[in-house]
Amino acid sequence: MSSSVKRTEKRVGLRMPIYFGSDTADCLGHIRNISLQGVAISCRELVTPQTPLKIRIAVPEGEILISGEVRWSRKFPLEISYVDHCEMGIRFLEHNELLEGFVNRMIKTLADHRLEPRFEKIFNLHLPSLEAAVAYNISRRGMFIMTANPPSLNSTVEVRLLLSEIDETIHIEGQVVHVVDEKTAFERGFDPGFGLRYLRILSNNQDIFFQYIDRLTNAFYG
């Protein structure tokens, strides 16, 4: 499992498409984090450890085409994800200049300074004065919200997070700490949106919210 893998290299968290397969790289997954040594992905196809893979990642400079090997894999608990049902760690068996340039650039521009784990799950969200949006990862401290029209950096926004499984709506005030506009998203293959750091929970169900986050975080990371 992922918790047993010791990492010694710099790794950056992001979300973008990746294609993989034993013979041809045509199975779609989504990168969760990546380094020069390997990548963690969420996907619908579960592949057993030690399986050789062909890997394809589209970046602005072209396509990264390399070989890899599955180090670990597992299925998500049913309550975790509505889209991708599995996750895998893949070790790169080769490097090239395109991969090295991409990873090093992402490490410089998207360094992850989070103090707590986040997990992937699609949440419905209401953002006043903005188009419909969804949050796809979340923690006790913040979340990333996908929207075509993100607010400006450092602005304060209020969101209402709908937790249908426990019939709760969480009213949150937060600060925008990271923005991916449509142009940047198109150039880099990311989802447009913004990172939100919580300033305060405006509803009176903060304890219920944090208990919910803790339960799913523990289920996600085992």
Image: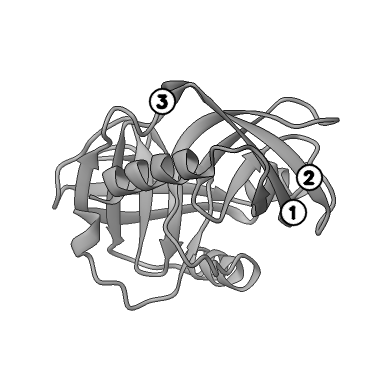
According to the image, label 1 marks what residue? 176
**Which residue type does callout 2 highlight?**
Val
In the figure, is residue 38 to the left or right of 198? left
Contact between labelled residues 1 and 3, with CB atoms less than 8 Å apart? no
In the figure, is residue 16 to the left or right of 29? right
- Look at the numbered disc 1 and give the secondary structure of its residue: strand
According to the image, label 3 marks what residue? 82
Q: In 3D space, how far apart are the residues under numbered discs 2 and 1 (Cα atoms)?
A: 7 Å
Packing grade of label 3 (10 A; few <14, some 14-19, many >=20) is few
Q: Which numbered disc covers residue 157?
A: 2
Can the viewer see residue 179 in this picture? no
Task: Check the image and report above or below for 145 versus 3.
Answer: above
Q: Identify which residue, 172 or 72, lies in the foreground.
A: 172
Residue 3 horizontal/vertical position (percent) = 23, 60
Q: Identify which residue, 11 or 202, lies in the foreground.
A: 202
Q: How many numbered marks have been drawn onto this rendered protein structure?
A: 3
Give the residue displayed 58% in from the left and 48% down from the top: 143
Give the residue displayed 74% in from the left and 54% down from the top: 176
**Which residue type does callout 3 highlight?**
Tyr
**Which residue type does callout 1 highlight?**
Val
Packing grade of label 1 (10 A; few <14, some 14-19, many >=20) is many
